[in-house]
Image (cartoon, grey):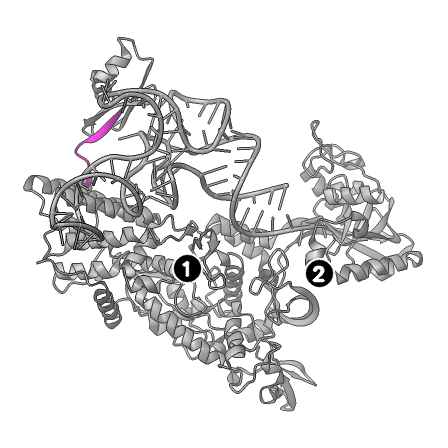
RNA sequence: GCCCGGGUGGCGGAAUGGCAGACGCGAUGGACUCAAAAUCCAUUGUCCGCAAGGGCGUGUGGGUUCGAAUCCCACCCCGGGCACCA
């Protein structure tokens, strides 16, 4: 009598069993070789969505697969639990962000549990946990001591919607906030920064050694934006006290400088402006500073309005010619020196500007003969450049820099697009920055023994969105750690990306009360062998975490040689519905819950694996899940020891069935290593179809179940237990294929004539070229086409293909 | 504008220079059933043909090769990243 496949009961049973047995808990002294598999910890927004399911399905599959290969697999999970949504909810409902957040975590954990993905929950971290806050603050203080955290006044990105400043990385290309979509405005504010630029070069170079998607590496390279060039001083005509320093990547073109440009915010603007130009310059500067970042960054608009003459002249050090100095909004204060030499012959922006303002254009690089464009930025022999004439670009650059250095007015430099990381946020629900402001001593760090600095519970959220900390007397008023006199606390909190920059280290030693983590514990597991998450973190989180790893290693908090946190990265594709990204804010969620309650977690997991290549974006369709669901039903009827849906293979066929099982093992094992899970599922389906036709053997079914155990853990565990009383499939070893058994007895040889398939003949795999040709020539179809003629050429690729060319 | 991806049946996709379309969805037909669902079996790129068989087919056009979805060149379309960065 066949048994029922009671999905709900079976999935619950095994989820309980794994938790109870601690199958996926590991100790730091586990003697097995270690493997650290990590999915990006989630922001707890309630029940899991399909993006989580996809992420954790891949992660769990790897955890179970590596475990079956004999590794001690560290598989932790936690929650990125600080952030604005909890604060917005507090404003709406009056619930404290902690209560709100803990409730969302409970919901998320429950749905993660129903997916069946396994974690060592003993190591769970939550960003808002006082212990975690303590160590985040402790790390902040170490960065402060080392000069890697500092405070400065700067024009920063202010998001009116979020009522806080943002890091450059959090502002989208169109000048809007990545979170709220509001237009970000510039404000001059004093803020906290982390000196990520100190690691710009290392962050760039170490990318080479990482097993990461090229796409992500390229995005990081672009973001860091290294450019080599030179900086040098231009003498201001008639002003011995004044020099204008410019940055260029093309010092070889200096002979072609016909004017210079400074940014409207440049500190020397006043000095450079002559009296008769003063009104015009003032109007220009006023207009530009009033423009939003978006307006300023548009390439559109009449060029006439984009610059103004200062009245001053600077001297080209290469040919001693005086050229006019302009202000223009296309030169940015934040990059290089905020001033440039303009060479219209080799730079299109300068070309356009020169045309508009009637400035000279001198080519200093010979463009190719067929050049039809305007400015020519490519390589070629230098012209109109006296002692540089005839040299190629690279040689000329070197010689030009030598000249500047010999003259003592300039030097070779490297510039980065990367800016320091602005980490302070004017928010309540974040990790407080642990410093106080003392009237006598200025910024004073809170003593280590007084950590953590925690936000008070009894707070009132203001409709303006301002942080309640700014108005909370009990929190604000404190004493100076140095002299004990009254002082005021910092009310800014840290960017939540600070929390996520070291959580993967805390997992290795989550219980440590003396330190954020022990170096030996970190050494045991780090770097993360496989990190899995969404492509949306390509720059933000992944760059910050890399910076933290390097800084912590240099500060002797992490092991010295541990300079990269994530050895191998996999970024899964997005899930879309009807072409747009599935998200809560778009209101187009298909919740996993409805599938847990019907077809079950195994079918949902298989569907995610089967939908397409893991890295690709996928369009969600409900229809497809029917396929994986009925496949599992089919598997059940096949493997149920009490079932008779599929007869045993006849004695003559059983050997061939077992041989096919060995081939399946070889194929699927390889597909797991290549992350080709969609074809691995297909192979298992194909094999199941094969057994329905040929009849089953015990070995075939057992192999199939073992190969599917990481993909569909519940149903395979249940079937295995029914077939092998008391055994747990996930505690067994991964199967290996016997190469002798896996070998084919006959293969199909394709016979082509002139590259077109004309016949297929069964041959032994050991066939040689001569035998192939003889067989092919004996084929009636080939003879018909040959018609007695002599083939020009015969290409034989034993044993699968022969091509006869006439 | 620059830099990455990608374009294959009605749909999701497979094929690491060697049988294009595995596997699944959908569709059609059959078996089972009083009937339906479920299940099982079969067919399913397209055109010509009763059939056997053959022609055509991987965005477009060229090229390399005995052989190209795969490599090269040019172009078109879609997605993503960067974009006055000197």
Q: Quadrant of residue A780?
A: top left
Residue occupying image coordinates x 67% and y 66%: A156
As drawn, is B11 to the left or to the right of A344?
left
As drawn, is A706 to the left or to the right of A297?
left
Query: Residue A786, relative to residue A223: is it above or below?
Result: above
Residue A343 visible in the displayed image: no
State the mark number for residue A517: none
Find the residue positioned furthest to the top. Answer: A788
Residue A532 location, x and y as percent? 41, 58
Q: Quadrant of residue A258?
A: top right
Q: Is residue A743 magenta?
A: yes
Residue pointed to by mark 1: A51
Q: CA distance from mark 1 to mark 2?
A: 35 Å
Q: A788 or B54, which lies in front?
A: B54
Does dot 1 land on a helix, a strand or a loop? helix
Find the residue positioned furthest to the bottom. Answer: A485
Circles 1 and 2, Cβ within 8 Å, touching? The answer is: no
Rendered-image quadrant of the C terminus of chain A? top left
Residue A196 location, x and y as percent? 59, 63
Tell which subunit mark 1 falls on: A
The residue segment tinted magenta is A742-752
Residue pointed to by mark 2: A292
Tell which subunit mark 2 falls on: A
Q: Is residue A100 magenta?
A: no
As drawn, is A35 to the left or to the right of A149?
left
Q: B16 or A9, which lies in front?
A: A9
Residue occupying image coordinates x 81% and y 41%: A355
Residue A780 visible in the displayed image: yes
């Amino acid at each position: 009598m066949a048994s029922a496949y009671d999905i709900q009961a079976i999935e619950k049973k095994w989820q309980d069993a794994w938790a109870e047995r601690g199958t996926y808990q590991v100790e730091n002294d586990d003697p097995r070789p270690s493997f650290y598999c990590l999915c990006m910890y989630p922001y707890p927004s309630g029940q899991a969505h399909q993006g989580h399911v996809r992420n954790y399905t891949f992660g769990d599959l790897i955890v179970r697969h590596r475990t079956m290969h004999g590794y001690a697999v560290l598989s932790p999970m936690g929650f990125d639990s600080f952030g604005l949504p909890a604060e917005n909810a507090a404003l709406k409902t009056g619930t404290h962000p902690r209560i709100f957040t803990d409730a969302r975590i409970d919901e998320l954990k429950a749905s993660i549990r129903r997916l069946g993905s396994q974690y060592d929950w003993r190591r769970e971290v939550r960003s808002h946990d006082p212990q975690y806050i303590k160590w985040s603050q402790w790390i902040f203080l170490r960065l402060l001591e080392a000069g890697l955290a500092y405070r400065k006044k700067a024009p920063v990105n202010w998001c009116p919607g979020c009522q806080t400043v943002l890091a450059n990385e959090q502002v989208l290309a169109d000048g809007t906030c990545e979170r709220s979509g509001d237009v970000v405005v510039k404000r001059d504010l004093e803020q906290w920064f982390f000196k990520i630029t100190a690691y710009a070069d290392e962050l760039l170079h170490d990318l080479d050694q990482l097993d990461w998607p090229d796409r992500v590496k390229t995005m990081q390279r672009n973001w860091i934006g290294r450019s080599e060039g030179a900086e040098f001083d231009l003498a201001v005509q008639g002003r011995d006290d004044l020099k204008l320093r410019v940055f260029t990547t093309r010092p070889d073109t200096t002979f072609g400088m016909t004017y210079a440009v400074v940014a409207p915010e440049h500190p020397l603007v006043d000095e450079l402006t002559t009296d008769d130009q003063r009104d015009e310059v003032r109007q220009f500067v006023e207009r530009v500073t009033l423009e939003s970042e978006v307006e300023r960054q548009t390439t559109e608009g009449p060029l006439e309005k984009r610059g103004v003459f200062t009245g001053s002249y600077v001297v080209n050090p290469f040919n001693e010619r005086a050229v006019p100095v302009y202000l223009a909004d296309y030169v940015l204060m934040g990059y290089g020196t905020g001033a440039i030499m303009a060479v219209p012959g080799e730079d299109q922006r300068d070309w356009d500007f020169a045309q508009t303002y009637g400035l000279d254009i001198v080519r200093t690089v010979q463009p190719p003969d067929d050049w039809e464009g305007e400015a020519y930025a490519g390589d070629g022999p230098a012209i109109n450049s006296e002692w540089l004439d005839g040299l190629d670009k690279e040689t000329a650059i070197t010689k030009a820099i030598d000249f500047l250095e010999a003259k003592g007015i300039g030097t070779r430099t490297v510039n980065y697009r990367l800016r320091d990381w602005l980490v302070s946020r004017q928010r309540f629900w974040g990790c407080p920055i642990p410093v106080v402001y003392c009237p006598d001593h200025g910024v004073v760090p809170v003593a280590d023994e007084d950590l953590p600095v925690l936000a008070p519970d009894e707070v009132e959220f203001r409709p303006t969105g301002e942080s309640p900390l700014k108005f909370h007397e009990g929190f604000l008023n404190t004493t100076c750690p140095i002299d004990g006199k009254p002082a005021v606390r910092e009310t800014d909190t840290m960017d939540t990306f600070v929390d996520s920059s070291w959580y993967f280290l805390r997992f290795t030693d989550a219980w440590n009360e003396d330190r954020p983590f022990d170096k030996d514990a970190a050494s045991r597991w780090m770097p993360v062998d496989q990190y899995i998450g969404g492509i949306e973190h390509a720059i933000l989180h992944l760059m910050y975490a890399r910076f933290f790893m390097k800084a912590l290693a240099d500060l002797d908090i992490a092991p010295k040689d541990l300079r990269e946190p994530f050895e191998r990265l996999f970024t899964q594709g997005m899930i879309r519905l009807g072409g747009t990204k599935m998200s809560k804010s778009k209101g187009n969620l298909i919740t996993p819950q409805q599938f847990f309650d019907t077809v079950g977690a195994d079918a949902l997991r298989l569907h995610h694996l089967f939908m397409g290549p893991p890295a690709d974006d996928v369009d969600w369709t409900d229809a497809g899940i029917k396929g994986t669901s009925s496949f599992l039903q089919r598997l059940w009827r096949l493997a149920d020891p009490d079932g008779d849906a599929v007869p045993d293979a006849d004695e003559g066929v059983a050997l061939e069935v077992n041989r096919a099982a060995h081939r399946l093992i070889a194929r699927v094992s390889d597909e797991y290593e290549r992350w080709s899970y969609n074809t691995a599922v297909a192979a298992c389906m194909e094999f199941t179809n094969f057994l329905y036709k040929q009849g089953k053997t015990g070995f075939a079914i057992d192999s199939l179940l073992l190969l599917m155990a990481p993909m569909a853990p519940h149903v395979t565990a249940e079937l295995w237990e029914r077939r092998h009383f008391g055994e747990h499939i996930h505690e067994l070893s991964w199967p290996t294929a016997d190469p002798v058994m896996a070998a084919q007895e006959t293969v199909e040889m394709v016979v082509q004539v002139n590259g077109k398939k004309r016949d297929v003949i069964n041959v032994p795999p050991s066939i040689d070229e001569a035998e192939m040709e003889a067989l092919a020539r004996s084929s009636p179809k080939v003879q018909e086409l040959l018609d007695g003629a002599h083939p020009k050429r015969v290409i034989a690729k034993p044993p699968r293909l022969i091509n006869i060319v006439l």
